[in-house]
Image (spheres, rainbow, N blue to C red):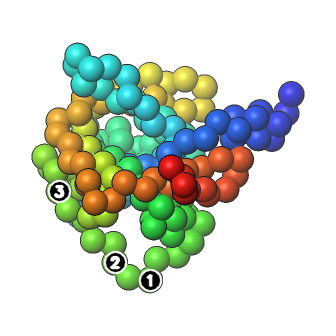
């Protein structure tokens, strides 16, 4: 099967959208990630998958602490900015949680520390321990990605 068929088939699995952010000496770097999942309760672990072709691949090698912000339905444009599909005119504000940059609007924000990495095919799977988290009870409408486009969970 060709790569496009495989990619389209995997796109039939609906996912939430996160922004993974990391701080270096001077800047915050981030990328849109929908390959995110919970792994373990004891210890509290999550996993993200990073493509070797992205700038974040090297950044995550240099920094072991990073943030994960689970996006709301109102953050479609931010998802596009961090996936390099759209330019951002204004600076993006960040907050910090246990030393990790996070977006100020989120459903859930996590501060994570690399626990283990596995290079598989053209991606790196980063398993990370959750150091702290915040839940935004006022904003509980996630944005979803399915079959190559954005969706919301209206009517739930």
Tell me where residue 19 appears, x and y as whole percent.
41, 53
For disc 1, the marked residue is 89
Residue at position x 71%, y 47% in the image: 147
Pick whichever, 39 or 64, lies toward us.
Answer: 39
Residue 40 visible: yes
Instruction: Give whichever of discs 1 and 3 has the lower sequence position.
Output: 1
Tell me: residue 4, above or below residue 142. above
- Residue 53: image quadrant is top right
For disc 2, the marked residue is 91
Residue, far front = 155
Q: CA distance from mark 1 to mark 3?
A: 22 Å
Residue at position x 16%, y 51% in the image: 97
Q: Secondary structure at mark 3?
A: strand
Pick whichever, 112 or 151, lies toward us.
Answer: 151
| Residues at discs 1 and 2 in contact (Cβ within 8 Å) | no
Instruction: Give whichever of discs 2 and 3 has the lower sequence position.
Output: 2
Q: CA distance from mark 1 to mark 2?
A: 7 Å
- Image position of 29 (left or right of 34): left
Q: Secondary structure at mark 1?
A: loop
- Image position of 37 (left or right of 85): left
């Amino acid at each position: 099967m060709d790569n496009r068929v495989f990619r389209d088939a995997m796109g039939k699995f609906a996912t939430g959208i996160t922004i993974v952010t990391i701080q270096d000496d001077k800047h915050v770097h981030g990328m849109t990630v929908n390959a995110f999942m919970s792994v373990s309760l004891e210890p509290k672990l999550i996993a993200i998958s990073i493509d070797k072709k992205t700038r974040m691949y090297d950044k995550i090698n240099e920094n072991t602490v990073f943030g994960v912000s689970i996006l709301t339905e109102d953050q479609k444009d931010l998802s596009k900015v961090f996936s390099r599909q759209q330019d951002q005119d204004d600076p993006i504000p960040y907050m910090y949680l246990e030393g990790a940059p996070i977006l100020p609007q989120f459903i859930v924000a996590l501060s994570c520390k690399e626990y283990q990495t596995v290079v598989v095919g053209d991606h790196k799977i980063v398993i990370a321990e959750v150091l702290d988290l915040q839940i935004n009870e006022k904003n509980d409408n996630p944005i979803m990605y399915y079959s190559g486009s954005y969706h919301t969970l209206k009517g739930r």
